[in-house]
C-alpha cells in the first residue's frame, strides 16, 4: 500500500488522473460528474494552525441516503456521560479479553471499559477494547461522537476509509477523524484498544526545550492515497451518534471518493518510530516526555487526553529508583500493554493475573499507585548498570477527569478482583 506522509499536511491525491480540481475546491462541474463535498472536523473558524478539513470528490454525495433508524442489535458500546451509580475510586485491572467464540466483527467486538466528560458537549473520552474474528463486509461505520485512536494488540487491521486504505499491525496506531466512514477487515482473530476522543482532535505535543525534533516526528505519520470502489450493492452504514447506534442502507459503496485533498485525514503511525527521550543523569522524569499525541482541553497543559507510550529504551539513571515512582495524580490513567512486560508490574504468574498483553488498568484521580511490591523490591536491589528494556510496549490514555468504569467492565470475568494485593506486604521503613 502507498502512503502520503506528514502529520497535519495538506495532502492531495487522486485515484484517477484529472479527478482533483486544480486551483479551486468546488468547480461548477467537477471532472467526470463527481460531487465535491467538504469534510470539516474543526469549526470553519478554528485558528489556522488547528483548522482541519478536507475536500472529497465522489461518485455520489454522502448526503444521498435514506433515514438512519435505530440499530436493533446488542452492543457493549457506551458513551459518556455513562449511566452509573457511585463511581468506583478503586484501582482496577483486567486480564486480556479472550477471543470471541462466535463470528464477531470489529464493531460488534467493542466493549466500553470507561469514559468521562460528555460526548454531547465535545469533552472527554470513551475507552473501548475489542476482540473480533471476522471482517466487516458490506458494512461501514461512522463515529460522529468522536475521533478514534485505535491501538491493535493482536492482528493486523486493514482499515478501508472514505479517503483510502490503511494497514495497521500491532505496534502501529491509527487515527480516524470524527465522522469518517470506515470498515475494518481482519486477517485473523484480533484484539486491541480504542480511545474515542470527544474533544479537540489529537495533535502533536509542543516540544518546549526539547527543540524542533523528537518524540513523534511529523513525517512518520502516514495518510492513505485516494482509493475507491464502484460497487452497486446494498451497504449497511452504521453511525454512532450521541451514544446510540443508527443504521441506514445505501445501494452503493460509501467508499466512492475518487480524489481528495486537505488536512483532515486518517493516519497511521509506527510506534517504533517514536524518538524516546529520557534521563541521562538521575531521577525518573514525568511520563509526559513519552507523549505521542495530545488532545488539549480549554485549560492549558491539562489534556482532555494524552496518548503516552512506554517503548523499549535504555535505563541509565544513577542512584535512582528507576521504575515509575509511587504517585497520586490529578489526571486519571487508563493503561494497556501491547507486548512484553511493563517495568512497574509483574506479568501473569502461571498464566494468571499480573499486567498482561491485552490487559488493562485504571488508576483514577488521586488514587495511589505505582510499581507492585515485587517490582519495587527488584528495583531497590538492582545493580544500576545501563540496562536496555527490550520487548516492551505499554501505553496510557491520560485524561483530566475521572474515567468512570462501565458496569459492563466491572462485571467482566477478566476483572482481577485481587488487584490491590499486588501492593501488599511492603516492609515498613525503620527510623533509627
Ligand atoms: O502509573 C503508571 O505506571 C504510568 C506512569 C509511568 C511513569 O513512568 C510515571 C508516572 C506514571 O503515572
Ligand atoms: Fe501513574
Image (cartoon, rainbow, N blue to C red):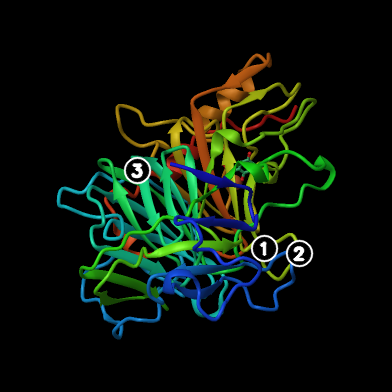
- Considering the numbered disc 3 on the image, is that residue within a helix, a strand or a loop? loop
Task: Report, in whole angstroms, how far the alpha carbon at label 2 lies from the one at label 3.
Answer: 35 Å
Q: State the count of labels.
A: 3
Nearer to us of marks 2 and 3 is 2
Residue receiving disc 1:
296
Residue receiving disc 3:
95
Which residue of the protein is positioned furthest toward the right in this rendering? 209
* Comes first in the chain, label 2 or label 3: 3
- In the image, residue 44 sits, relative to residue 232, either above or below, namely below
Q: In the rendered view, does 212 fall on the left or right side of 141? A: right
Disc marking residue 375: none
| Mark 3 burial class by Cα count in 10 Å: few <14, some 14-19, many 20+ | many
- In the image, residue 6 sits, relative to residue 262, either above or below, namely above
| Mark 1 burial class by Cα count in 10 Å: few <14, some 14-19, many 20+ | many
Q: Is residue 331 visible?
A: no
Image x and y of residue 30, in percent: 50, 73
Which residue of the protein is positioned furthest toward the bottom in this rendering? 67
- Considering the numbered disc 2 on the image, is that residue within a helix, a strand or a loop? loop
**In percent of the image, x 75 and y 22: which residue is there?**
319
**Quadrant location of the C terminus?**
top right
Residue receiving disc 2:
300
Task: Report, in whole angstroms, how far the alpha carbon at label 3 lies from the one at label 1.
Answer: 30 Å
Image x and y of residue 193, in percent: 42, 50
**In percent of the image, x 48 and y 70: which residue is there?**
31
Image x and y of residue 4, in percent: 56, 47
Amino acid at each position: 500500500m502507498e502512503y502520503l506522509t506528514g502529520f497535519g499536511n495538506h495532502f492531495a491525491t487522486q485515484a484517477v488522473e484529472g479527478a482533483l480540481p486544480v486551483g479551486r475546491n468546488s468547480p461548477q462541474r467537477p471532472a467526470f460528474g463527481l460531487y465535491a463535498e467538504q469534510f470539516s472536523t474543526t469549526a470553519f473558524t478554528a485558528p489556522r494552525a488547528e483548522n482541519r478539513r478536507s475536500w472529497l470528490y465522489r461518485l455520489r454525495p454522502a448526503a444521498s441516503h435514506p433515514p438512519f433508524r435505530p440499530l436493533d442489535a446488542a452492543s457493549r458500546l457506551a458513551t459518556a456521560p455513562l449511566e452509573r451509580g457511585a463511581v468506583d475510586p478503586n484501582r482496577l485491572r483486567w486480564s486480556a479479553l479472550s477471543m470471541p467464540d462466535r463470528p464477531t466483527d470489529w464493531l460488534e467486538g467493542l466493549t466500553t471499559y470507561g469514559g468521562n466528560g460528555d460526548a454531547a458537549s465535545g469533552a472527554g473520552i470513551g475507552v473501548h477494547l475489542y476482540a473480533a474474528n471476522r471482517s466487516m463486509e458490506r458494512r461501514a461505520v461512522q463515529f460522529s461522537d468522536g475521533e478514534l485512536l485505535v491501538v491493535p494488540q493482536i492482528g493486523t487491521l486493514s482499515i478501508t476509509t472514505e479517503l483510502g486504505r490503511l494497514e495497521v499491525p500491532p505496534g502501529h496506531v491509527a487515527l480516524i477523524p470524527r465522522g469518517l466512514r470506515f470498515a475494518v477487515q481482519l486477517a485473523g482473530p484480533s484484539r486491541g484498544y480504542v480511545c474515542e476522543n470527544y474533544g479537540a482532535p489529537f495533535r502533536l505535543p509542543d516540544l518546549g526545550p526539547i527543540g524542533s525534533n523528537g518524540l513523534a516526528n511529523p513525517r512518520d505519520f502516514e495518510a492513505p492515497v485516494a482509493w475507491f470502489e464502484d460497487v452497486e450493492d446494498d451497504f449497511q452504514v452504521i453511525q454512532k451518534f450521541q451514544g446510540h447506534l443508527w443504521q441506514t442502507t445505501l445501494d452503493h459503496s460509501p467508499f466512492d471518493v475518487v480524489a481528495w485533498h486537505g488536512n483532515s485525514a486518517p493516519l497511521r503511525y509506527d510506534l517504533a518510530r517514536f524518538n524516546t527521550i529520557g534521563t541521562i543523569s538521575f531521577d525518573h522524569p514525568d511520563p509526559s516526555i513519552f507523549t505521542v499525541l495530545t488532545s488539549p482541553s480549554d485549560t492549558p497543559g491539562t489534556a482532555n487526553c494524552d496518548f503516552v507510550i512506554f517503548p523499549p529504551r535504555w535505563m541509565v539513571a544513577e542512584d535512582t529508583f528507576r521504575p515509575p515512582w509511587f504517585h497520586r495524580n490529578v489526571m486519571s490513567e487508563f493503561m494497556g500493554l501491547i507486548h512484553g512486560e511493563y517495568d512497574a508490574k509483574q506479568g501473569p504468574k502461571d498464566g494468571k493475573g499480573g499486567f498482561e498483553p491485552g490487559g488493562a488498568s485504571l488508576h483514577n484521580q488521586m488514587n495511589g499507585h505505582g510499581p507492585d511490591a515485587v517490582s519495587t523490591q527488584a528495583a531497590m536491589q538492582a545493580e544500576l548498570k545501563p540496562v536496555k528494556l527490550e520487548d516492551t510496549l505499554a501505553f496510557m490514555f491520560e485524561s483530566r477527569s475521572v474515567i468512570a468504569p462501565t458496569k459492563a467492565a466491572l462485571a467482566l470475568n477478566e476483572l482481577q478482583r485481587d488487584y490491590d494485593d499486588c501492593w501488599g506486604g511492603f516492609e515498613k521503613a525503620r527510623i533509627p
